Amino acid sequence: MNTVDAAWLLISAALVLFMVPGLALFYGGMSRSKNMLNMLMMNMVCLGIVPVVWIVIGYSLSSTGTGTWLGSFDAAFLDGVEHVAEDGSSPLLLAFFGLTFACITPALISGAVADRLKFSAWMVFVPVWLLLVFIPTWAWVWRSDGFLADRGSLDFAGGTVVHIAAGAASLALVMVLGKRKGWPDEPMLPHNLPLTMLGAGILWFGWFGFNAGSAFGVSTVTVQAFANTFIAGATAMLGWLLVEKIVDGHATSLGGASGIVAGLVGITPGAGFMGTWAAALVGFLAGMACAAAVRAKFRGGYDDALDVVGVHMVGGLVGGIMIGFLANPSIFVGDGEELPFDEGLFTGGGVGLLGEQIFANVFALLYAFIVTYVIARVLDAVIGLRVDDDAEQIGLDQSEHAESAYN
């Protein structure tokens, strides 16, 4: 890793880290005012819990040693990581770039459980979920000898590891936690949409580090991932607004902000595997699919407060499966060079990659859902997940933190 590559990875790590407060504002603006600080805290506390878990054992189990299902304890407490590798790269840099992904993934789940989860339960849930769900999924998808990677599935920057895992976990957690008092009969409207739009802009900005940084250096793949991230966010916003206009007769700022995020989620798994026009299509499809999916919670009866399931699980599935149709390795190599990955169904390949994408995405979804459901049941029995009715009524800012966002 030369100095230019290292500099880009440092910048990318900072961009991904900045996504966490961006996500906090995005979710916070969508919450009711009495729960604003609680939502900010649920996101920001991940920056306190996750780094400790990661440097003690998370990085080692996810990324070191050999093994189809999980890594080793070789780098526990970052043993040996703070030394320059033989190829000149810095394992510490790679470890901390990965750490930023580990920080934002459980934070995504917070939006689903808004307004009713005990903060103490969240403090326990985050490290347990990280160890039992996120880290194994990372090892299967991103280790070269991982279970799913070895089969041939692709995930450039976290469609499976981050978004599908968090989305499926959100569905399991809200099923155990139950509905907010009054939902869906009482309107529970966002209290500050300008903050939500600002949060969406910060997320879009940080997402360039999330996707283009996952090229681990500066190359043509980096440029393509950067371009794909931009165009997918744009077309997804248009796709979401189109659905709103057709169904409701108007386009909303909340829809525009949500559409941006849906497109960014959708392109994440394929950002470095397809061309610009393919990314534009993925974004547009993700925007429309997620706009339709967030309406399904009312028919399904599950109270996903801030639409984590509809945006992250569904958007991740759309993006992950579309790799099987649109993956185009030829744009990254010269004539006569070996293709770096399999082609999609529409770009010269057969159904092999498509089948692996479907298998990997569904497998990761089911694993995250089942394990999270078990974790939630155990925590609910041992310490209780939900605040009492009075605390929910006055708001979690006062009941959990003894503060108010607006004095």
Image: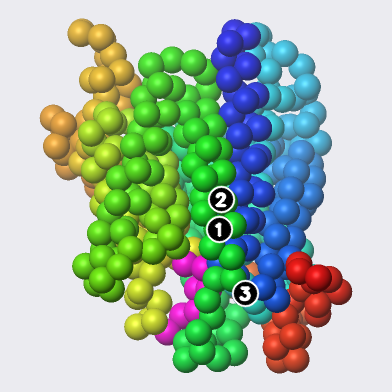
Secondary structure at numbered mark 1: helix
In the image, 20: left or right of 319?
right
275 or 405, nearer to the observer:
405
74 or 214, nearer to the observer:
214
Q: Which residue is mark 2?
A: 198
> Which residue is rendered at x = 74% and y = 48% of the image?
47
Percent x, y for residue 94? 64, 27
In the image, 81: left or right of 356?
right
Name the amino acid, label 3: Arg
Q: Which mark is residue 194?
A: 1
Whether pointer 1 and pointer 2 mark residues with C-beta atoms closer than 8 Å, the reply is yes
Q: Quadrant of the C terminus?
A: bottom right
Prevailing SS of the magenta stretch? loop
Name the amino acid, label 2: Leu
Q: Which residue is mark 3?
A: 32
Query: Residue 341: within the magenta?
Result: no
Specify few, some or many for label 1: CA neighbours under 10 Å numbering under 14, 14-19, or 20 or more: some
342 or 314, nearer to the observer:
314
Which residues, given as a range, are shown in magenta? 301-307
Residues under labels 1 and 3: Cα distance? 14 Å
